[in-house]
Image (cartoon, rainbow, N blue to C red):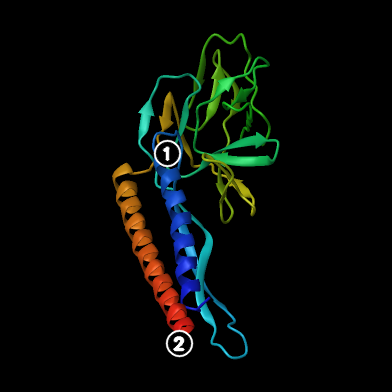
Amino acid sequence: MPNGIYPSLTRQHGLMQEMQVVANNLANSSTTGYKTDRAIFAEFLVPGGTSQESVSMGGLAGHAFQFDQGELKFTGGQFDLAVQGDGFFVLQTPQGPRLTRAGHFQLSSAGTLVDGMGNSVLGAGGNPITVPVDAAEISIGSDGSISAGGQLVDRVGVAIADGQLLRDSNTMFSAPGGYTQFEEATVVQGALEQSNVSPVLEVARMIEVQRAYEAGQSMLEREDDRINQLITAVRER
């Protein structure tokens, strides 16, 4: 296969990967706490052998997430929480601590504050939050402090990552470098942070990627026809 085709095939593969990222953004445009994803590509050289020059190619190198705050939707839910500004809620999952901006929580039968998957919400001290199941009146202050019947129970932990975040699921991130409690965080009770995806921008990007893919496909087809014509001409000589 001529060297010129390899970069084109790599580009087509990269465009397919970017299309998947854009499609996932669109699919989560209504997902609480979802953050827009962007594909990052990097160039690398592939040796062409002793008699050929190296070939410049590209591939998916990682993801960049846009952590701009999404719009707050006020639900009035007692355990619906949102972080105003920087910071993430901390969940204890079977895979370890995870950070999230999706604050749709509830009480388990044991009185533990959990998310929809049953993962425990961690307090500022790093332990699961337990609320008396018979508490008649529960309020959560802007500093995350949880009061039941006028008595302080615990404080919702809000943390910032010490380094890069890696997406673990649509709304959860792992922090390989660890995280630190963010004491200046503002918690809003009775509200949920909406996705920060802009459907209009994502659709525009999808059209752009699709057109680029179609142009690349057309080029590959022309190159294939050229090679076939060359082979036919050689055979007929």
User: Which quadrant, please, contains the C terminus?
Assistant: bottom left
Q: Secondary structure at mark 2?
A: loop
Tell me which residue sits at (61%, 49%) in the image. Answer: 175
What residue sits right under mark 1 in the picture? 27
Query: For the residues marked 1 and 2, what is the alpha-carbon distance in whole angstroms?
Result: 56 Å
The disc placed on residue 237 is 2
11 relative to 164, above or below? below
Asked if residue 125 can be seen in this view, the reply is: no
Nearer to the camera, 131 or 152:
131
Nearer to the camera, 83 or 66:
66
Q: Position of residue 1 (x, y in %)?
A: 53, 75
Nearer to the camera, 222 or 137:
222
Q: Secondary structure at mark 1?
A: helix
**Residue 62 falls left or right of residue 200:** right
136 relative to 58, above or below? above
Nearer to the camera, 144 or 18:
18
Q: Quadrant of residue 71?
A: top left
Neighbourhood count class around disc 2 (C-alpha, 10 Å): few under 14, some 14–19, many 20 upward = few
Tally of marks: 2
Neighbourhood count class around disc 1 (C-alpha, 10 Å): few under 14, some 14–19, many 20 upward = few
Tell me which residue sits at (62%, 90%) in the image. Answer: 50
| Residue farthest to the bottom, as pictured | 51
Q: Amino acid at mark 1?
A: Ala
Q: Position of residue 105 (x, y in %)?
A: 54, 25
Q: Check contact, mark 1 vs mark 2: CB within 8 A.
A: no
Q: Position of residue 78 (x, y in %)?
A: 48, 19
Q: Amino acid at mark 2?
A: Arg
Point out the frontmost of discs 1 and 2.
2
Q: Quadrant of residue 147?
A: top right
**Residue 214 falls left or right of residue 154:** left
Tell me which residue sits at (46%, 40%) in the image. Answer: 34
